[in-house]
Image (cartoon, helix red, strand yellow):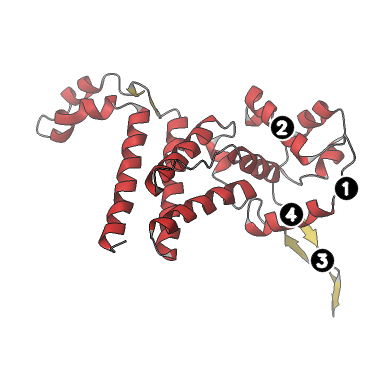
């Protein structure tokens, strides 16, 4: 059985003229700030037994299943078999498939190193963006699953806090530092998602570009002049070079913004 769907909780029953009325509300969306707040409060009350089942152990087992068989293989039954326990034991730690994915996604982002380079804010941001990309490219969750989650877990928040801190130290005001941090995360996550997909580039360029010259030859000669001039560079650019170029353009923009404001 695969867990999915939102979890509803019941409020106490009230009465009106027609009789009892049962009220229900949806639990916070997994990955949201409210959801993480509730998890933190619940975890603080837990008294795990020595050697007993823990959320950390469940996540590690889930990661092994993901790496071996992908998302389809990640079921409650598969996890329960790993621990030789019942499904109910696992439900004490997460209530839905989306909750488990949120936990896994944030756990993976804990691998991002927040090392300072000693060479100033720009080198530090470049190192942080490269680290984020490295971790996202290597994580076992498919992009489609990771994109459904809000990113308010403790490991992702430490990355956001680090980026905000670097842009504030560079001299950006609060609102500009916030927008720049959002743009940074969108650029890194978006480019990494594309690179992980079947349409992503490889070390020798676009993986679907075989026959590109023949394709252009079959199109009207008075069209696509820019591609005829620079198409080879477009199709052959290696994936790492493309990311490095985009990173440089991003940081050049931040540097120009700081210079324009005299910071």
Instruction: Write down the quadrant of residue 119 in the picture.
Output: top left
Estimate the x, y position of residue 45 in percent, counting from the top left: 84, 54
- Of all residues, the one furthest to the left in this rendering is 222
Estimate the x, y position of residue 238 in percent, counting from the top left: 33, 26
Query: Would residue 212 appear left or right of 186 to someone viewing this image?
Result: left
Observer able to see residue 19: no
Q: Which of the image's four quarters has the C terminus?
A: bottom left
The residue sitting at 79% across, 67% down in the picture is 23
- Which numbered disc covers residue 11? 3
The CA span between labels 3 and 2 is 34 Å
Estimate the x, y position of residue 201 in percent, counting from the top left: 38, 27
- Which numbered disc covers residue 192? none
Q: Nearer the viewer, residue 69 or 171?
A: 171
Q: Earlier in the sequence, mark 2 or mark 1?
A: 1
Q: Secondary structure at mark 1?
A: loop
The CA span between labels 3 and 1 is 27 Å
Estimate the x, y position of residue 184 in percent, counting from the top left: 42, 48
Q: Earlier in the sequence, mark 3 or mark 2?
A: 3
Residue indicated by mark 4: 40
- Which numbered disc covers residue 60? 2
Observer able to see residue 23: yes
The CA span between labels 1 and 4 is 13 Å
Cβ atoms at labels 3 and 1 below 8 Å apart: no
Q: Secondary structure at mark 4?
A: helix
At label 1, counting other C-alpha atoms closer than 10 Å, the crowd grade (few under 14, some 14-19, many 20 or more) is few
The residue sitting at 43% across, 32% down in the picture is 195
Label 3 or label 1, whichever lies nearer to me, is 1
């Amino acid at each position: 059985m695969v867990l999915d769907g939102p979890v509803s909780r019941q409020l106490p029953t009230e009465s009106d003229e027609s009789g009892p009325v049962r009220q229900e509300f949806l639990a916070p969306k997994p990955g949201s700030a409210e959801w993480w707040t509730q998890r933190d409060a619940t975890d603080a009350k837990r008294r795990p037994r020595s050697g007993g089942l823990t959320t950390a152990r469940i996540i590690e087992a889930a990661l092994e299943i993901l790496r071996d068989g992908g998302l389809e293989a990640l079921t409650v039954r598969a996890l329960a078999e790993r621990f030789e326990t019942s499904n109910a034991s696992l439900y004490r730690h997460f209530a839905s498939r989306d909750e488990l994915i949120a936990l896994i996604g944030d756990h993976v982002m804990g691998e991002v190193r927040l090392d300072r380079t000693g060479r100033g804010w720009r080198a530090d941001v470049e190192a942080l963006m490269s680290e984020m990309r490295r971790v996202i490219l290597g994580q076992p969750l498919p992009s489609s699953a990771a994109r459904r989650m809000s990113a308010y877990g403790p490991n992702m928040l430490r990355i956001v806090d680090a980026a905000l801190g670097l842009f504030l130290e560079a001299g950006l005001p609060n609102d500009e530092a916030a927008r720049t941090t959002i743009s940074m995360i969108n650029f890194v996550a978006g480019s990494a998602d594309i690179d992980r997909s079947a349409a992503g580039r490889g070390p020798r360029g676009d993986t679907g570009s075989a026959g590109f010259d023949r394709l252009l030859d079959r199109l009207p000669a008075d069209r696509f002049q820019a591609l005829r001039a620079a198409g080879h560079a477009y199709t052959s650019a290696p994936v790492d070079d493309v990311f490095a170029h985009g990173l440089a353009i991003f940081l050049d923009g931040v540097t120009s913004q700081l210079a324009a404001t005299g910071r």
